[in-house]
């Protein structure tokens, strides 16, 4: 039976659709329209107690029993372990995957997300302060990523779930008001990933 992907068309949602396509896992999309507050529905709360998308339900979980997983990083680790793809059992090789996955979740997501927010604030004074603060940090994070990708092909060396996590947010670089030409290593990595057929399918699938 296919995995249920409960999500909306956001960077965090795209992380998971890309990973599912790359891993070759069958899935169905259950749209959760966050603009209409559907994330607060009791049905969704059962699988995502923090009322955030995405979440998954795997009918063939560990031991053959169904399992639900919320938080995009946890979902990526779960899927990597389930399939053995874009993940590793080697403890040393796991470290950079987890480092860059946590880097995305703690910074390269929350900070650009604040840019998204303040671009919509009508009060010019409030908008300017927020944009100055969060655009500066967003650009710093792009710089960190650019330095790393000058050393390796993918963020953890081999292609991994960490790349899918970061790609979900790099996809929104126009909305971050970031020109990837200023970060050539990020641009090389971004173009290389977006040219992959499974990644393309992950971005083309309708998430609402």
Image (cartoon, helix red, strand yellow):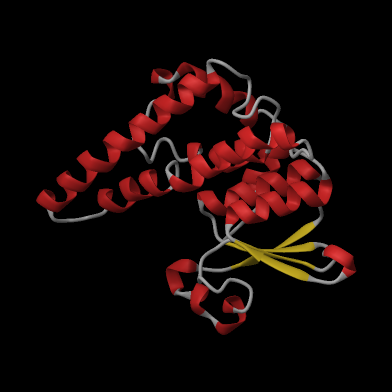
State the count of labels. Answer: 0
Q: Toward which corner of the image does residue 165 lie, by quadrant?
A: top right
Q: Is residue 116 above or below residue 68?
A: above
Residue drawn 38% across and 19% down? 182
Q: Toward which corner of the image does residue 89 lie, by quadrant?
A: top right
Q: Residue furthest left?
A: 125
Is 119 displayed left or right of 104 in the figure?
A: left
Between 11 and 73, the one nearer to me in the picture: 73
Is 175 displayed left or right of 200 in the figure?
A: left
Image quarter hosting the C terminus: bottom right
Q: Toward which corner of the image does residue 61 lie, by quadrant?
A: bottom right
Is 60 displayed left or right of 37 in the figure?
A: right
Residue 1 at least partly seen: no
At which x and y percent is residue 145?
48, 27
Residue drawn 45% across and 74% down? 37
At which x and y percent is residue 58?
78, 65
Image quarter hosting the N terminus: bottom right
At which x and y percent is residue 86?
74, 38
Q: Is residue 166 above or below residue 114?
A: above
Q: Residue furthest bottom?
A: 42
């Amino acid at each position: 039976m296919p995995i249920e992907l409960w999500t909306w068309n956001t960077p965090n949602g795209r992380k998971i659709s890309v990973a599912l396509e790359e891993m070759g896992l069958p899935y169905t999309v259950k749209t959760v329209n966050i603009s209409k507050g559907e994330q607060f529905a009791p049905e969704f709360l059962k699988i995502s107690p923090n009322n955030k998308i995405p979440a998954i339900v795997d009918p063939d979980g560990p031991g053959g029993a169904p399992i639900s997983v919320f938080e995009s990083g946890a979902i990526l680790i779960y899927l990597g372990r389930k399939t053995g793809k874009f993940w590793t059992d080697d403890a040393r090789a796991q470290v950079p995957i987890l480092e860059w996955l946590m880097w995305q979740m703690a910074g390269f997501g929350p900070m650009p997300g604040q840019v998204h927010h303040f671009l919509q604030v009508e009060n010019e004074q409030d908008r300017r302060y927020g944009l100055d603060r969060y655009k500066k940090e967003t650009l710093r994070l792009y710089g960190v990523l650019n330095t790393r990708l000058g050393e390796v092909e993918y963020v953890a060396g081999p292609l991994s779930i960490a790349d899918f996590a970061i790609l979900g947010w790099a996809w929104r670089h126009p909305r971050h008001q970031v020109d990837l030409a200023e970060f050539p290593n990020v641009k090389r990595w971004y173009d290389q990933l977006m040219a992959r057929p499974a990644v393309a399918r992950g971005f083309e699938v309708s998430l609402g």
